[in-house]
Amino acid sequence: MSITSPKGFQAAATTAGIKPSGAPDMALVVNTGRQRTAAAVFTRNKVCAAPVTLSKEAIAGGGLDAVVYNSGNANACTGQQGYRDAQEMQGIVAEGLGVDKHNVAVCSTGLIGEPLPMPLVREGAQALLGGLGAYGSEAARAIMTTDTVPKEVLVEGPGFLLGGMGKGVGMMAPSLATMLVCLTTDAQASAEALDTALRRATASTFDVLDIDGSTSTNDTVILLASGESGVEPTQEALDAAVLQACRSLARAMQADAEGVTKRVSITVTGAHSEEEALAAARTIGRDNLVKCAMFGSDPNWGRVIAAVGMAPVSMEPARISVRFNGHTVCADSTAVPGAREVDLSGSDIAVEVDLGTGQPGTATVYTTDLSHAYVEINSAYTT
Amino acid sequence: MSITSPKGFQAAATTAGIKPSGAPDMALVVNTGRQRTAAAVFTRNKVCAAPVTLSKEAIAGGGLDAVVYNSGNANACTGQQGYRDAQEMQGIVAEGLGVDKHNVAVCSTGLIGEPLPMPLVREGAQALLGGLGAYGSEAARAIMTTDTVPKEVLVEGPGFLLGGMGKGVGMMAPSLATMLVCLTTDAQASAEALDTALRRATASTFDVLDIDGSTSTNDTVILLASGESGVEPTQEALDAAVLQACRSLARAMQADAEGVTKRVSITVTGAHSEEEALAAARTIGRDNLVKCAMFGSDPNWGRVIAAVGMAPVSMEPARISVRFNGHTVCADSTAVPGAREVDLSGSDIAVEVDLGTGQPGTATVYTTDLSHAYVEINSAYTT
């Protein structure tokens, strides 16, 4: 199960030497199919990396022949030289494959603000071009940074396959991590159908995976279609497969988030709209006091209600209820007997908050606890 | 130097037994002056505690004769019973002092969601009424929760004195802490003049003390004037004294914030407006990755620039500059040689970010690092 499981895709991975650790750090994914449509979504950070700028230009045409990846260096905040370096990566791959360079996307992940070591990158790119094959799982390893495990998925749709690889820990570590995802399918689909499916899927998966509210300069999710199955699925079938793959990769990222000891879902109901429910859920999910309580398995609902009171949404302040793992701990904004005895010692915690308006708006975000390991990893990384 | 240094004020403190630790946990401040004007600002959290609701009603008349405090229990999320309990505290004090109950404010701080232990509170209130004197410093100790030191200030204005006490660690621990401040002055001043001075001062002090983005259900800042100096200062002189006191207390709170090892100021310049500068500074100051880097004394400017790129304000993404402790580490959104060698090992770190728009908007927020101790304190509190 990998991005080379669907028909019409090849991949390669290599160790170019960009990472000091000596782990694999470059990958290439090539669409060899009869149809090479594609769609992509990118970071919303106003400060975006050179490869993001370049890949946005590439995807504008609705098709991609290849995506080249490097880890260990984000090529972000590297000025004009960074853009030229990303162009050179694109050009080497395009020339090697004999395709239009405007159909090659570039994705980088790693430290911000350091120039790419181009001699290593050039050599690595040539190694990738000479090593293409069914190496989807090797590619998934080569894009890892602080990930502890590679993240792959394979979904079987009606008559077609959809594979995926991802790296990163949500939007958790913009100085080095980044979320990168590549999805491949042998379905026949127009660029518009792919774009629709991808935007629908990311809205309820990667977009609500909110580890610490941080958004990387490099986040990129790309979907490539080869058409080699000969099957053109309905939009619904395509949507379902892309959603299933994104959901699986998002769960894997949440479980592998830096320093995580708990996977926490925050569901808000009783909001005036889905947007307001989402805003309230994000406010709770980003609250460090709530996250520390989760780390301590502490059913401290007072922190949840204090957090939700800061959300810029409509609520009935005296009618809020809170449930932990299905147990009501707070009703009408006051304690329920036994609230402090609810067991949160397991690794999954479900928090449900009803805003008391009686309206149907609801949304869920996925986050984690705030642990000693998070502080350790993130205070000691570059030094 | 305490709240009883200005003429016309008395205070008392006692151990009612609300705190399991046996530390002092109730205080009373009484204005005995010829003029008893007052002003107050309260939490903006939509979920506010019963004593906040009651004190808002009390201050509406523009005067206060007394403020009664308890620590160890926030009387928040306690429903109708909580409001009746706050009213009872107010009533006991009013009756004991022989004043209108509508001129008595109530402030509580501590755990959310637990009913006030009223037998203890009643006995404590009587003890306060029988123990009034020059006990401002004792009162400052009795309102502490996780504070490690009491926080007091005395400012000498032209012909008048202004004293203050505060507790809390910014908006850092809404489940138990809360920011409470009481300022006393023997200046003659109308309620309007006091309100103007207090709002001006809090806007640039407590309002920009942003330890973790959390806002308590109980935050209350009260300013009482006795008129006993016989001096009516100009608005400028009053503003200056209130600002100086608030600045001093805010700095003390920042230094005593839970788990803090670094005091961090974030200044944003080159924004379209002061509001946009403030929004950008808050976004940086709340970013856990930036805060972890500060804990690690790591000049990781990439995290600062990634954080600012998420701020909902206008900027020139390729023209951003970052300075740490006066050293430019990033110019035009790219690294400056030597950037990673800047020494951040001291306990104060100044971060300056210019958004590159050439516009004059500027603002500063005061925050702290994110340390192991923060996680420890906040994951193990109620369990």
Image (cartoon, coloured by chain):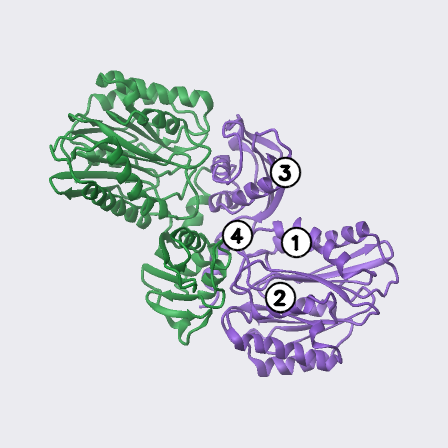
Chain colours: A green, B purple
Q: Secondary structure at mark 1?
A: helix
Q: Position of residue B193 (x, y in %)?
A: 77, 56
Determine which of the numbered discs, if any, sits on residue B250 in the image.
1
CA distance for labels 2 and 4: 19 Å
Determine which of the numbered discs, if any, sits on residue B144 in the image.
2
- For the residues carrying marks 4 and 3, which lies nearer the camera in this image? 3
Corner quadrant of residue A2 = top left
Mark closest to the chain's N terminus, 2 or 4? 2
Amino acid type for the residue under numbered disc 2: Met
Quarter occupied by the C terminus of chain B: bottom left
Give the residue number, with chain letter if any, for mark 3.
Answer: B362
CA distance for labels 1 and 2: 15 Å
Mark closest to the chain's N terminus, 2 or 3? 2
Mark closest to the chain's N terminus, 1 or 4? 4
Q: Secondary structure at mark 4?
A: loop
Determine which of the numbered discs, if any, sits on residue B212 in the image.
4
Amino acid type for the residue under numbered disc 3: Thr
Check if mark 1 and mark 4 are on a common chain: yes
Q: Secondary structure at mark 3?
A: strand
Label 2 neighbourhood size at 10 Å, few (<14), some (14-19), many (20+)? many
